[in-house]
Amino acid sequence: MSRMIHEFRDPERFVAGTVGEPGDRSFFLQVTSGPQTLSVQIEKQQVLILADRLGYLLDEVARRFGTAVPPEAQVSDTSPLEMPIDAEFQVGSMGLGWDAEGSSVVVELLAVTDAPIDEDVILDDTATGPDTVRIFLTAQAAREFSARSQRVVAAGRPACPLCDQPLDPNGHLCARSNGYKRGAEFSRSLEFVDPEVLGMLGRLVPGFDAAFEADPETEDGDADDEPGSGERA
């Protein structure tokens, strides 16, 4: 089957949102352009990292290339996700880029796959590879996405004052009180690329990985984030 690439050049909306109650939330990204709304399911930690890296990318663009970018934004879109949600796929890997010609941030979301991701398929139109959603955002829209995403993630269960992990209604195993902590580190590598195929600057910025993707055993302290159910938080 050939690769499907959904591209949104000038979306009216790109937001993160959740379905479910705190402690049992599923996270989604949703992009709307005209009559089309497309949703993908994503891990909570991926949302947080994407929001963080978008801000870092804009700061780097301003520092390295002298491009004017807006400051951190307030949340302007507080509306819920469009229903019903029919997720196109579960996000496995993500890519970020800067389109110098269009002064746009490029967000690429790639479907989870059992095979290792070839970095050449990220921000490229190769015929083989995982299905992809590619979104072009203004710098302002990227700032607003980050602001809303951080608020969405923070709206879950309150944090334990000792270990900063989410609290369950019936308590939890606190790493500070008994030394126990389960789970693994989540990959926090950053992609910052400008490939020629997208009319960008055509060179990699030194010092950053070419992609970042979800660790299947990511840990964020939620009781429902056991292997096999990492999409809930």
Image (cartoon, rainbow, N blue to C red):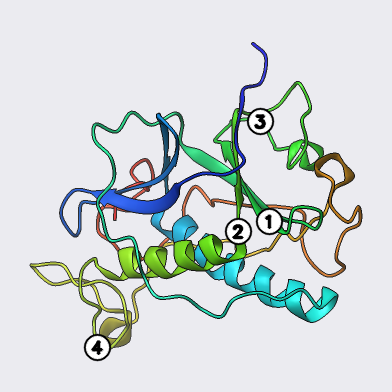
**Residue 120 at what x, y percent from top left?**
82, 39
Q: Is residue 208 above or below residue 43?
A: below
Q: Residue at x 36, y 46 (%)?
A: 231
Circle 3 residues within 10 Å: few <14, some 14–19, many ≥20: few
Per the image, label 4 sits on a secondary structure element best described as loop
Precedes in sequence: disc 1 or disc 3: 1
- To which residue does mark 1 refer? 104
**Residue 85 at what x, y percent from top left?**
29, 33
- To which residue does mark 2 refer? 138
Per the image, label 2 sits on a secondary structure element best described as loop
- In this rendering, the label closer to the viewer, 2 or 4: 2
- To which residue does mark 3 refer? 115
Q: Amino acid at mark 4?
A: Pro
Precedes in sequence: disc 1 or disc 2: 1
Query: Residue extending furthest front?
Result: 34
- In this rendering, the label closer to the viewer, 3 or 2: 2
Q: CA–CA distance between discs 3 and 2?
A: 33 Å
Per the image, label 1 sits on a secondary structure element best described as strand
- To which residue does mark 4 refer? 161
Q: Is residue 83 above or below residue 24?
A: above
**45 or 16, nearer to the observer:** 16
Q: Is residue 195 visible?
A: yes
Precedes in sequence: disc 3 or disc 4: 3
Q: Is residue 140 left or right of residue 228?
A: right
Asked if the residue at tag 2 contacts the one at tag 1, i.e. Cβ–Cβ closer than 8 Å, the answer is: yes
Circle 4 residues within 10 Å: few <14, some 14–19, many ≥20: few
